[in-house]
Image (tube, grey):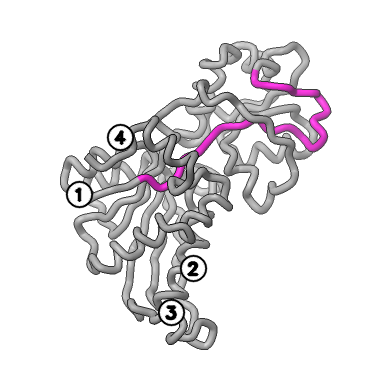
Amino acid sequence: MQDGCNGLSRRKFITATALACTSALVPSRAFGRAFERENLQVWSCGGLAEAFVSANKYYQEMMGCNIAYTGAFAAALGKSLLANAQTDVFGPRVLDLARKLKAQGKMLNFRPLCFTRYVLITPKGNPAGIGGVEDLAKPGVRVLLSPDSSPPGGKATMVVLKKAGVLEGAQRNAIRMGDCVQREVAIVASGKADVSVVEYRITKLSQFRGKFDVIDIPERFFPPPPIPFTIGIMKWANNMELAEDFVKFITSEKGQSFFEKAGFIPALSEEGERLTKKYGVKDA
């Protein structure tokens, strides 16, 4: 689920509540189901939705609990939690938000979850011969931009282009200046645009998997704030033991595999450890 897409208002939450599977599907003795019928409320910034939905389902089947999951726009969730909203576990985007919640005593602790990265996408076969980000400023290249997609998505891609020194040229070449990444990258897949800048995770969405050629963008052009995702336990957790166990699972090798599959760099990886140090992702 990309923030701001799927025809939903930017102020509306994207909510998915999945019930635990029956014991006939997952025998109790196999997993112990330590939190049978217990409830856990998990919120995250919307970009993590695909990973969390799959990870939550797996955890529910193991533990017998019910997870009420909400994936919503980063700005909306952050604002609500900094005010009076409450949840048990929160996976924020932008490290400063986790730090603010911790400083206010609303988040008890947090740890690195995963990292995102930006890439160029072209139609399959790369018919325009795009070789790198500098090509977005070349005359005749049909560029698709989404500067008005919900933050930090749209603004972050503009920062990538600015840091690469091609923003003005890419804007001149833009055939569309849109407001929803998921809706607009379909134009690239159709061949009506030559190239766009997206988070790598977009290429892993089921509707787009295998429909693009992907070209790396150098990390030096990435804007730092949207890169790290963290996960933390909130002070309102009704079942602290369950919340702690869930976070432990999400940051375990199995839990992290769902985020890797969704196109993120897991914190529990050699690359994730490097990025954790680079961005200073620590609970302090």
Which residue, given by chain and number where applicable, does mark 2 sit on? 57
Which residue, given by chain and number where applicable, does mark 3 sit on? 31
Total marks drawn? 4
Q: Confirm whether the magenta stretch covers residue 62.
A: no
User: Which of pointers 3 and 1 lies earlier in the amino acid sequence?
Assistant: 3
> Mark 1 Cα within 10 Å, few/some/many (few <14, many 20+)?
many
> Relative to 259, does residue 224 appear above or below in the rendering?
above
Q: Which of marks 2 and 3 is in front?
A: 3
Amino acid of disc 2 = Lys
- Residue 56 spot, x, y in % from top left: 45, 64
The residue that appears at 39% across and 62% down in the rendered structure is 249
Please tell me whether mark 3 sits on a helix, a strand or a loop.
Answer: helix
The residue that appears at 57% across and 24% down in the rendered structure is 218
Q: Distance between the residues labelled 2 and 3?
A: 14 Å
Cβ–Cβ under 8 Å for marks 3 and 1:
no
> Relative to 41, does residue 66 appear above or below in the rendering?
below
- Residue 159 spot, x, y in % from top left: 50, 21
Q: Nearer the viewer, mark 3 or mark 1?
A: 3
Considering depth in this image, is 62 or 189 the residue closer to the camera? 62
Considering depth in this image, is 269 or 34 the residue closer to the camera? 269
Please tell me whether mark 1 sits on a helix, a strand or a loop.
Answer: loop
Which residue, given by chain and number where applicable, does mark 1 sit on? 106
> Mark 2 Cα within 10 Å, few/some/many (few <14, many 20+)?
some
Considering depth in this image, is 56 or 16 the residue closer to the camera? 56
> Relative to 164, does residue 272 appear above or below in the rendering?
below
User: Which of pointers 2 and 3 lies earlier in the amino acid sequence?
Assistant: 3
> Relative to 83, does residue 123 appear above or below in the rendering?
above
Q: Distance between the residues labelled 2 and 4?
A: 29 Å
